[in-house]
Image (tube, rainbow, N blue to C red):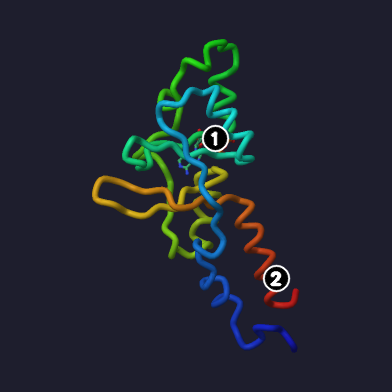
Amino acid sequence: YSGKKAGQDLSESVMNMKVKDFQSIPVVVSEKVSVYDAIAQMFLEDVGTLFVVNEQSLLTGVLSRKDLLRSSIGNKEISKIPVHIIMTRMPNITYCFKHDPLLHVAKKLIEKQIDALPVVAEHENGLEVIGRITKTNITAAFLSLAENHDL
Ligand code: ADP
């Protein structure tokens, strides 16, 4: 019985895993950029989800790979379509805060069948995007939990 955290209960460790300890840097685009430029940005930044912000840098939308694929199929004018036309928009965005338990985020990802959540901070006029949590971050957390319990 020589676990690094042998004295610590597994359930306690799980609840101590917070969003801020596992989040990634968010990639945001303006509402005005074209579908074409959003696709380029997605490849450039190597992410699967882009967050869309307005002129005040507040969260207004989410763009997934399939959102961009769907709008591109059979459409030759994607450099003329702004992303705000095709994005999933507020108030239908699922988000989280940096102090939330990662377990709650995992539950939301599965329940809503989505790949990523923006980590936000509340402001008077809306939500500022400060991070990104994806299924990859959850997998990394799962692994660190196993390692910390010598599994
Ligand atoms: P994909 O569409 O590439 O499979 P997702 O499963 O993440 O990727 O997205 C499915 C749908 O849910 C898309 O239309 C996307 O805009 C939307 N979506 C993705 N993330 C969120 C989120 N955090 N809140 C609300 N909707 C989201």
Q: Which image quarter holds the C terminus?
A: bottom right
Position above or below: 129 against 102: above
Q: Quadrant of residue 144?
A: bottom right
Mark 2 residue's CB less than 8 Å from ligand 1? no
Residue at 31% across, 40% down = 56
Mark 1 residue's CB less than 8 Å from ligand 1? yes
* Discs 2, 1 touching: Cβ within 8 Å: no
- Mark 2 or mark 1, earlier in chain: 1
Whether residue 67 sits left or right of residue 141 in the image: it is: left
Residue at 53% across, 29% down = 38
Position above or below: 41 against 2: above
Where disc 2 sits, the SS reads helix
> Where residue 29 sits: x, y (%)?
46, 35
> Where residue 31 sits: x, y (%)?
40, 30
Position above or below: 68 against 3: above
Front residue (pair 125, 86): 125
Position above or below: 32 against 5: above
Give neighbour class at mark 2: few <14, some 14-19, many 20+ (Cα, 10 Å).
few
> Where residue 133 sits: x, y (%)?
54, 52
Q: Which image quarter holds the N terminus?
A: bottom right
User: What residue did someone put label 1 on?
Assistant: 64
Q: Which mark is residue 146?
A: 2
* Amino acid type at mark 1: Ser
* Amino acid type at mark 2: Ala
